[in-house]
């Protein structure tokens, strides 16, 4: 693997494989996370195994995409030049948190030393796109089953060399509250009013698209599954394709609470909220469960900005 200076910024050129559908950007960011962990934590995520020799997978438990109007996953396009800085943080023997910051090349990018969690949580820059990933090492309890995965600490994993995360920044508390409430939205805030809830969509796990190379439902596939549910809601509201594509994703949080087997079906429940004073700002909650068992698979919340639909060129 290519060794990277953990303090160095890298130039990234947006390719067709990392823009358009949100899942493509998420997939690319996931690769950045695996590379960062490989460079900083003393273990190769691609070949990691536990003390018994069984595979250990660096699974995504929580992902957050946080940007602004000038840079967010929806506004990236072919050839955009970006500067990427990444950092990893110690959150325990079987977990790691990674933070990526993207800025447009040539912009006023802050020094690498300033890339820390306080920047992300307290003073995020409007001209930067952040990707936060919280990963846990897991393994299978039963061969060929994606249900009831177990914690699995790989041989050689050394998070103690990383900066220690402060408790107030731990995504464990964020995900605990989201699981209890069924949303990442601030349920006590009076700023958003309910527009529509109780909308449901189903998604049979697609063996031609949803699985990764080890047979698990790929973490980025969940972005496509969730966005498919949002698109169904858009259609019920009478919105068209251009309206959907013109929307900007300002914040996207997802917590993965399980995986699914080929042949299973996921059921989505969708709710839409609108800001009281800023009608263009909306929040969409999507919860995924496994049909039949009712097992909770994922909780997601998106904050979107609906922008004017551009006219097609004649």
Image (tube, grey):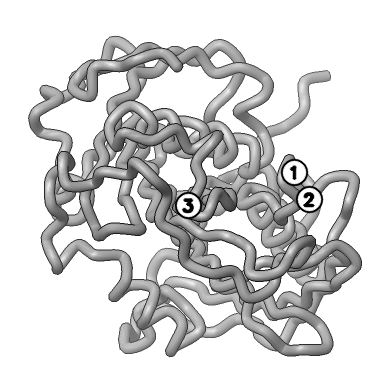
In the image, taking residue 241 as reference, residue 299 lies left or right, namely left
Quarter of the picture holding the N terminus: top left
Residue at the (13%, 44%) spot, across then down: 163
Q: Are marks 2 and 1 in contact (CB under 8 Å)?
A: no
- Foreground: disc 1 or disc 3: 3
Q: Secondary structure at mark 3?
A: loop
Camera-nearest residue between 79 and 258: 258
Which residue carries the number 2 mark? 210
Instruction: Return the residue nearer the eye: 87 or 111.
Output: 87
Contact between labelled residues 3 and 1, with CB atoms less than 8 Å apart: no
* Residue 120 against residue 7 in the figure, above or below: below
The residue pinned by badge 3 equals 50
Distance from Cα at disc 3 to Cα at disc 2? 26 Å
> Which mark is first along the chain, 1 or 2?
2
| Labels 2, 1: front one | 2
Q: Position of residue 218 (x, y in %)?
A: 67, 50
Q: In this figure, which residue is indicated by the disc labeled 1?
A: 242
């Amino acid at each position: 693997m290519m060794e990277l200076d953990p303090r160095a910024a890298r130039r990234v050129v947006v390719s067709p494989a990392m823009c358009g559908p949100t899942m493509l950007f998420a997939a690319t960011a996931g690769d950045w996370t695996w590379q960062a962990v490989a460079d900083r934590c003393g273990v190769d995520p691609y070949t990691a195994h536990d003390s018994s020799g069984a595979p250990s997978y660096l699974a995504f438990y929580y992902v957050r995409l946080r940007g602004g109007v000038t840079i967010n996953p929806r506004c990236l396009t072919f050839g955009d030049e970006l500067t990427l800085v990444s950092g990893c943080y110690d959150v325990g023997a079987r977990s790691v948190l990674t933070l990526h910051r993207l800025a447009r090349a040539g912009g006023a990018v802050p020094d690498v030393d300033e890339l820390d969690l306080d920047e992300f949580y307290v003073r995020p820059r409007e001209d930067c796109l952040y990707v936060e990933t919280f990963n846990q090492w897991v393994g299978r309890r039963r061969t060929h089953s994606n249900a009831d995965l177990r914690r699995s600490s790989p041989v050689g994993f050394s998070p103690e060399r990383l900066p220690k995360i402060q408790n107030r920044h731990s995504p464990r508390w964020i995900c605990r509250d989201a699981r209890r409430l069924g949303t990442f939205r601030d349920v006590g805030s009076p700023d958003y009013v309910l527009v529509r809830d109780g909308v449901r969509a189903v998604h049979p796990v697609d063996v031609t698209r949803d699985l990764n190379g080890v047979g698990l439902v790929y973490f980025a596939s969940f972005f496509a599954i969730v966005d498919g549910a949002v698109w169904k809601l858009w259609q019920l509201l009478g919105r068209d394709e251009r309206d959907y594509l013109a929307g900007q994703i300002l914040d996207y949080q997802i917590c993965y609470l399980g995986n699914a087997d080929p042949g299973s079906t996921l059921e989505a429940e969708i709710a839409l909220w609108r800001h009281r004073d800023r009608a263009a700002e909306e929040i969409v909650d999507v919860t995924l469960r496994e049909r039949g068992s009712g097992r909770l698979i994922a909780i997601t919340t998106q904050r979107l900005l609906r922008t004017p639909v551009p006219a097609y060129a004649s």
